Amino acid sequence: MKRLIAESYGLLLWTGLILSWQRFEGLRRRIERTPTADPDASSSFRIAEICRAMDVACVLYLKKVLCLQRSAATTFLLRHYGHKAELVIGARMFPLQSHAWVEVDHAVVNDKPYMLDIYQVLDRC
């Protein structure tokens, strides 16, 4: 678990830098170019373990982690361990709000399962 937390923290740093320098467009391009790795049985982690490690890394992170940064980092980590993760961006009109989460096989994995009931999906990558 310590290894996953360290990887999660590193990905939070990396995605934070990408968002600072290249904005959402640069982050989106990197996500689209990141393939899902072949799952290796010896180092494969379950989705819940990966999401839990990311939650711990977010608590340890020096700055407030927003949903886009957290979800992008989670997407990269899940794909690294062979899970077909998708970053999803959604919005609602009233009150106007946007949100990002991660889905694997169209199931929300790093947030509440009813995100699709609250937010209209704007983009998937």
Image (cartoon, rainbow, N blue to C red):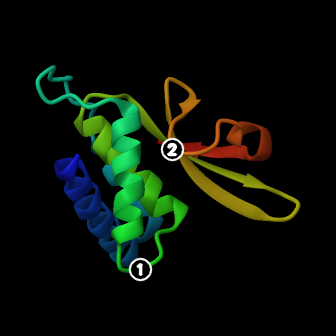
Residue 103 place in picture, x, y as percent: 51, 35
- Mark 1 lies on a secondary structure that is loop
**Left or right: 111, with 96 as reference point:** left
Residue 110's disc number: 2
Q: Nearer the viewer, residue 42 or 18?
A: 42
The residue positioned farthest toward the left in the image shown:
42
The residue positioned farthest toward the front in the image shown:
1
The residue at 41%/35% (across/down) is: 48
Residue 106's disc number: none
Residue 52 place in picture, x, y as percent: 40, 46
The residue at 26%/31% (across/down) is: 45
Residue 67 place in picture, x, y as percent: 53, 60
Q: Nearer the viewer, residue 18 or 49?
A: 49
Q: How far apart are the alpha carbons under marks 1 and 2?
A: 19 Å
The residue at 47%/76% (across/down) is: 64
**Left or right: 80, with 32 as reference point:** left
Could you tell me the amino acid type at mark 2? Asn
Relative height, residue 85 to residue 69 (above, below): above
Could you tell me the amino acid type at mark 1? Lys
Mark 1 or 2 closer to N-term? 1
Tell me if residue 63 can be seen.
yes
Residue 35 place in picture, x, y as percent: 27, 35
Residue 63's disc number: 1
